[in-house]
Amino acid sequence: ETIDGQGKLLFPGLIDVHTHLREPGQEDKEDILSGSRAAVRGGFTTILAMANTQPVIDKRALAEFVRLQGERAGYAHVLPIGTVTKGMQGEELVEMADMKEGGVVAFSDDGKNIQNAEVMRLALEYVKLTGLPIISHCEDNYLAGDGLMRRGRASGRMGLKGIPASAESVIVARDLILTEETGGKLHLAHISTAESVELIRRAKARGVNVTAEVNPHHLIFCDEDIHLTDTALKVNPPLASQEDRAALIEGLQDGTIDMIATDHAPHTQAEKARPFAEAPFGIASLETALSAVYQYLVLTGKLSWERVIEAWSYSPAERFGLKGGTLKPGTPADMVLFDPGYKEVIEPSNLVSKARNTPFLGKTLQGFPVMVWVEGRLVQRNRMLL
Ligand code: DOR
Ligand code: ZN
Ligand code: ZN
């Protein structure tokens, strides 16, 4: 068969290092089948499944379950992330070597569970035996308290309890210091402030073994875009200021930030319909992330297309050991054919994720994957799953 690629782009299947698939335990929000279908519709051929499921992924058998469910689904490669501490309770470390045997490619607790700097230090020391990175969710800690959005002019105007920027950067600084001291390997999830970017820039200049990711929503939106009547932009870490957003884009372009990752966080419509203060944090983004980045950042000249593809495929593969690992050279490729002119209305009838919590609902986005191959097998064509 001849494929007409006129006017389209062909690039490696994207690797998303931060997705919440909610299985096991919260399959009403999403499951591994629906989440991995959403992934290939969005151009992702490999997704890393975050560990905060119910139960949390703290044993080899649970990691094997996630991987197996991914294989059974047959869409994207689904690679499990394990927790750092048993039950994500922040006390006893998991059996890291054993979980690596079970297929985990990184370890990650909720930030609040490794508030204890001693636990984080031990984890960074111990993880060296596996060669895998520890993922830190710096935003999630005592300084954030029960805040609802970033503390600043917008939170003041709306009268919503604010989360100070320091809630993130204090832990970024701590984790960089501990990583430098232990010689461990650190990956910082969803960096959202200018101060964090600057801390990472300086640590990298000193040779600290750190990588960082940024979410599309932090590159596209800021706290001024939040409205009390719409919880779609209630997310953690919270949307920051316009200055922060500019610093994130600059950090991504100059290599201080290595990767883009979705933080796909599916929630039920009932939960997101609650009042702003009670709705859960999170944006479901697998099906819109690439198009949104293309439309808001590439088409506007803020980011180069080359950098976007590098940050969403090459850098994740390198950091999480996927080159010559899962994706062996010489095996049939994971590829995406992207049509920059393709327009689609984001509406429930065409979303394959179970979740609807996207700020793009009812809006039209431009630029979508129109063919996706996983290991040489066509899994999506003309926006339909095969
Ligand atoms: O907004 C968020 N929701 N951020 C996270 O990092 C976690 C996620 C979730 O699990 O819902
Ligand atoms: Zn997080
Ligand atoms: Zn997350």
Image (spheres, rainbow, N blue to C red):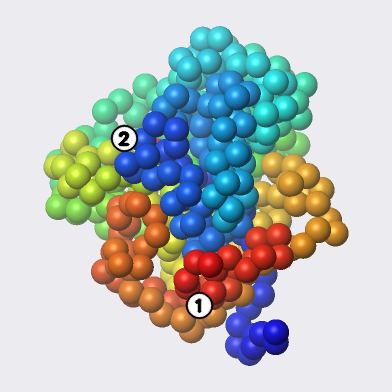
Viewer-side residue, 55 vs 302: 55
Front position in the image: 244 or 1: 1
Q: Is residue 101 visible?
A: yes
Residue 327, percent from left and from top: 75, 52
Q: Residue at x 30, y 25 (%)?
A: 145
Crowdedness of circle 1 by 10 Å Cα count: few (<14), some, many (20+)? some
Callout 1 secondary element: loop
Real-space CA distance between mark 2 and mark 1, rounded to the nearest whole angstrom: 42 Å
Q: Quadrant of the N terminus?
A: bottom right
Ligand 1 rendered quadrant:
top left
Q: Residue 218: in sight, yes or no?
A: no
Of callouts 2 and 1, which one flags the residue occurring earlier in the amino acid sequence? 2
In the image: residue 271, left or right of residue 311: left
Determine the image quadrant of residue 173. Answer: top right
Q: Is residue 246 left or right of residue 376?
A: left
The relative height of residue 59 versus residue 341 in the rendered view (above or below) is: above
Tag 2, which secondary structure? strand
Observer-nearest of 144 and 169 = 144
The crowd level at tag 2 (other Cα within 10 Å; few <14, some 14-19, many 20+) is many
Task: Please state the horizontal and vertical placement of residue 201, each as a whole percent of the image.
Answer: 63, 44
Residue 163, label in figure: 2
> Residue 25: x percent and y percent?
39, 31
**Could you tell me which residue is drawn at 57 percent across and 56 percent down?**
75
Q: Residue at x 53, y 15 (%)?
A: 86
Q: Amino acid at mark 1?
A: Asn
State the image coordinates of residue 158 (x, y, percent, origin top left).
16, 46
The amino acid marked with disc number 2 is Ile
**Image position of 90 with respect to 32: above or below:** above
The residue under the point 27% across, 58% down is 225
Closer to us: mark 2 or mark 1? 1
Q: Is residue 179 above or below residue 369?
A: above
- Residue 382 image label: 1
